[in-house]
Image (tube, grey):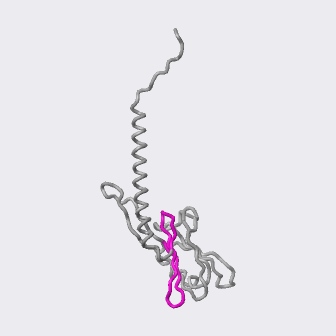
Amino acid sequence: MADVWKGDNPFYLMIRHPQLSDGKIVNTIIDLDEEDWKDRNREIIGLPGKWFIVNKVDGVTPIAMLVKDGEIPFYRARHVGVGAGTEDNTVTAEVVAYGLGKELEFGHEHILWHFYPANVTVSNEDVNAIGIEVLKISNAMKLVERRAREIAAEKAAALDSTEPTQIPSGDSA
Protein backbone atom coordinates (compact mmCIF):
# COMPACT_ATOMS: atom_id res chain seq x y z
CA MET A 1 0.00 0.00 0.00
CA ALA A 2 3.04 2.27 0.44
CA ASP A 3 3.12 3.10 -3.28
CA VAL A 4 -0.31 4.77 -3.13
CA TRP A 5 0.40 7.28 -0.35
CA LYS A 6 0.61 10.96 -1.16
CA GLY A 7 2.91 13.60 0.34
CA ASP A 8 5.42 13.52 3.19
CA ASN A 9 3.17 12.84 6.18
CA PRO A 10 4.45 9.57 7.68
CA PHE A 11 1.00 8.67 9.06
CA TYR A 12 -2.46 7.78 7.89
CA LEU A 13 -5.68 7.89 9.86
CA MET A 14 -7.73 4.75 10.44
CA ILE A 15 -11.23 5.18 11.82
CA ARG A 16 -13.14 2.13 13.12
CA HIS A 17 -16.80 3.07 13.01
CA PRO A 18 -20.28 1.66 12.43
CA GLN A 19 -21.22 1.47 8.77
CA LEU A 20 -24.04 3.88 7.98
CA SER A 21 -26.14 1.28 6.16
CA ASP A 22 -26.18 -1.64 8.60
CA GLY A 23 -24.16 -0.64 11.69
CA LYS A 24 -21.45 -3.23 10.99
CA ILE A 25 -18.03 -2.09 12.26
CA VAL A 26 -15.65 -1.19 9.42
CA ASN A 27 -12.22 0.42 9.05
CA THR A 28 -11.85 3.54 6.94
CA ILE A 29 -8.27 4.35 5.88
CA ILE A 30 -7.54 8.03 5.19
CA ASP A 31 -4.35 9.43 3.68
CA LEU A 32 -3.80 12.63 5.65
CA ASP A 33 -1.85 14.15 2.75
CA GLU A 34 -4.96 14.23 0.55
CA GLU A 35 -6.19 17.82 0.52
CA ASP A 36 -9.90 17.02 0.70
CA TRP A 37 -9.80 14.12 3.17
CA LYS A 38 -12.07 15.90 5.67
CA ASP A 39 -14.73 16.73 3.10
CA ARG A 40 -14.67 13.25 1.55
CA ASN A 41 -15.10 11.62 4.96
CA ARG A 42 -17.40 14.15 6.62
CA GLU A 43 -20.16 11.59 7.40
CA ILE A 44 -17.90 9.18 9.30
CA ILE A 45 -15.80 11.82 11.10
CA GLY A 46 -18.78 12.70 13.27
CA LEU A 47 -19.62 9.11 14.20
CA PRO A 48 -18.66 7.46 17.48
CA GLY A 49 -15.74 5.13 16.93
CA LYS A 50 -12.02 4.66 17.39
CA TRP A 51 -9.37 6.80 15.72
CA PHE A 52 -5.82 5.58 15.11
CA ILE A 53 -2.75 7.34 13.73
CA VAL A 54 -0.79 4.63 11.87
CA ASN A 55 2.73 4.79 10.43
CA LYS A 56 2.57 4.35 6.64
CA VAL A 57 5.75 2.27 6.54
CA ASP A 58 5.73 -0.08 9.52
CA GLY A 59 2.10 0.01 10.74
CA VAL A 60 3.02 1.19 14.25
CA THR A 61 0.13 3.00 15.95
CA PRO A 62 1.46 5.68 18.33
CA ILE A 63 -1.91 7.27 19.14
CA ALA A 64 -5.42 5.82 19.52
CA MET A 65 -8.51 7.68 20.68
CA LEU A 66 -12.05 6.66 21.55
CA VAL A 67 -14.70 9.04 20.18
CA LYS A 68 -18.02 9.00 22.00
CA ASP A 69 -21.36 10.34 20.84
CA GLY A 70 -21.34 14.15 21.01
CA GLU A 71 -17.54 14.49 20.88
CA ILE A 72 -15.94 16.19 17.88
CA PRO A 73 -12.70 14.47 16.83
CA PHE A 74 -9.89 16.12 14.88
CA TYR A 75 -6.39 15.60 13.51
CA ARG A 76 -3.63 18.22 13.55
CA ALA A 77 0.01 18.45 12.55
CA ARG A 78 2.27 20.96 14.23
CA HIS A 79 5.76 21.99 13.13
CA VAL A 80 7.85 22.29 16.29
CA GLY A 81 11.15 23.40 14.81
CA VAL A 82 14.34 22.61 12.96
CA GLY A 83 17.85 22.37 14.25
CA ALA A 84 21.25 22.90 12.74
CA GLY A 85 23.85 20.50 14.00
CA THR A 86 26.70 21.30 11.65
CA GLU A 87 29.30 24.04 11.37
CA ASP A 88 27.60 25.46 8.27
CA ASN A 89 24.15 25.48 9.98
CA THR A 90 22.74 22.86 7.64
CA VAL A 91 19.38 21.68 8.94
CA THR A 92 19.93 18.26 10.47
CA ALA A 93 16.72 17.72 12.39
CA GLU A 94 13.10 18.68 11.88
CA VAL A 95 10.57 17.89 14.55
CA VAL A 96 6.87 17.63 13.74
CA ALA A 97 4.14 16.69 16.20
CA TYR A 98 1.11 14.83 14.85
CA GLY A 99 -1.99 14.98 17.00
CA LEU A 100 -5.37 13.42 17.58
CA GLY A 101 -7.85 15.25 19.70
CA LYS A 102 -11.49 15.81 20.44
CA GLU A 103 -13.68 18.64 21.60
CA LEU A 104 -15.49 17.77 24.79
CA GLU A 105 -18.32 19.50 26.62
CA PHE A 106 -17.95 23.15 27.56
CA GLY A 107 -15.33 23.79 24.86
CA HIS A 108 -12.60 21.68 26.45
CA GLU A 109 -10.17 19.85 24.18
CA HIS A 110 -8.22 16.67 24.81
CA ILE A 111 -5.20 16.21 22.48
CA LEU A 112 -2.36 13.70 22.30
CA TRP A 113 0.71 14.61 20.25
CA HIS A 114 3.25 12.24 18.72
CA PHE A 115 6.70 13.56 17.81
CA TYR A 116 8.12 11.96 14.71
CA PRO A 117 10.73 10.63 14.10
CA ALA A 118 11.52 10.73 17.84
CA ASN A 119 8.60 8.40 18.67
CA VAL A 120 7.53 10.28 21.79
CA THR A 121 3.84 10.82 22.64
CA VAL A 122 2.73 13.55 25.06
CA SER A 123 -0.38 15.36 26.21
CA ASN A 124 -1.35 18.79 24.93
CA GLU A 125 -0.09 20.46 28.12
CA ASP A 126 3.44 19.15 27.51
CA VAL A 127 3.80 19.55 23.75
CA ASN A 128 5.81 22.79 23.78
CA ALA A 129 8.25 21.92 26.55
CA ILE A 130 8.82 18.36 25.36
CA GLY A 131 8.99 19.49 21.73
CA ILE A 132 11.98 21.70 22.48
CA GLU A 133 13.69 18.81 24.29
CA VAL A 134 12.97 16.43 21.40
CA LEU A 135 14.55 18.97 19.04
CA LYS A 136 17.64 19.27 21.26
CA ILE A 137 17.95 15.47 21.49
CA SER A 138 17.53 15.12 17.72
CA ASN A 139 20.28 17.67 17.13
CA ALA A 140 22.59 15.96 19.65
CA MET A 141 21.97 12.56 18.04
CA LYS A 142 22.81 13.97 14.60
CA LEU A 143 26.10 15.31 15.98
CA VAL A 144 26.89 11.94 17.59
CA GLU A 145 26.08 10.12 14.33
CA ARG A 146 28.28 12.52 12.34
CA ARG A 147 31.20 12.06 14.76
CA ALA A 148 30.80 8.27 14.65
CA ARG A 149 31.00 8.38 10.82
CA GLU A 150 34.13 10.57 11.03
CA ILE A 151 35.82 8.15 13.45
CA ALA A 152 34.90 5.16 11.27
CA ALA A 153 36.32 6.92 8.20
CA GLU A 154 39.54 7.78 10.07
CA LYS A 155 39.96 4.15 11.18
CA ALA A 156 39.29 2.85 7.67
CA ALA A 157 41.84 5.31 6.23
CA ALA A 158 44.42 4.25 8.83
CA LEU A 159 43.91 0.58 7.94
CA ASP A 160 44.23 1.31 4.23
CA SER A 161 47.48 3.23 4.69
CA THR A 162 49.36 0.55 6.62
CA GLU A 163 51.78 -1.66 4.77
CA PRO A 164 50.86 -5.32 4.79
CA THR A 165 53.19 -7.21 7.07
CA GLN A 166 54.83 -10.37 5.97
CA ILE A 167 54.52 -13.26 8.33
CA PRO A 168 57.51 -15.61 8.35
CA SER A 169 56.59 -19.05 7.13
CA GLY A 170 58.53 -20.80 9.84
CA ASP A 171 60.59 -22.71 7.31
CA SER A 172 64.30 -22.44 7.92
CA ALA A 173 65.90 -23.05 4.66
Which residue is pictured at 54% across the width and 13% down the height?
171
- Dominant secondary structure, magenta: strand
Say which quadrant the N terminus sits in. Answer: bottom right
Q: Is residue 112 above or below residue 108?
A: above
In the image, taking residue 50 as reference, residue 172 lies left or right, namely: left
Which residue is pictured at 61% across the width and 78% down the height?
50
Q: Residue furthest left?
A: 88
Residue 125 image offset from top left, x and y in percent: 47, 77
Which residue is pictured at 43% across the width and 47% down the height?
148
Residue 61 image offset from top left, x and y in percent: 58, 68
Which residue is pictured at 41% across the width and 27% down the height?
163
Identify which residue, 130 or 26, lies in the foreground: 130
What span is colored magenta in the figure?
98-122
Q: Is residue 143 above or below residue 106?
A: above
Identify which residue, 124 or 8, lies in the foreground: 124
In the image, taking residue 144 as reference, residue 67 lies left or right, namely: right
Q: Is residue 89 above or below residue 160?
A: below
In the rendered image, residue 7 lying in the magenta stretch gets the answer no
Residue 136 image offset from top left, x and y in percent: 40, 62
Identify which residue, 58 or 62, lies in the foreground: 62
Q: Residue furthest top?
A: 173
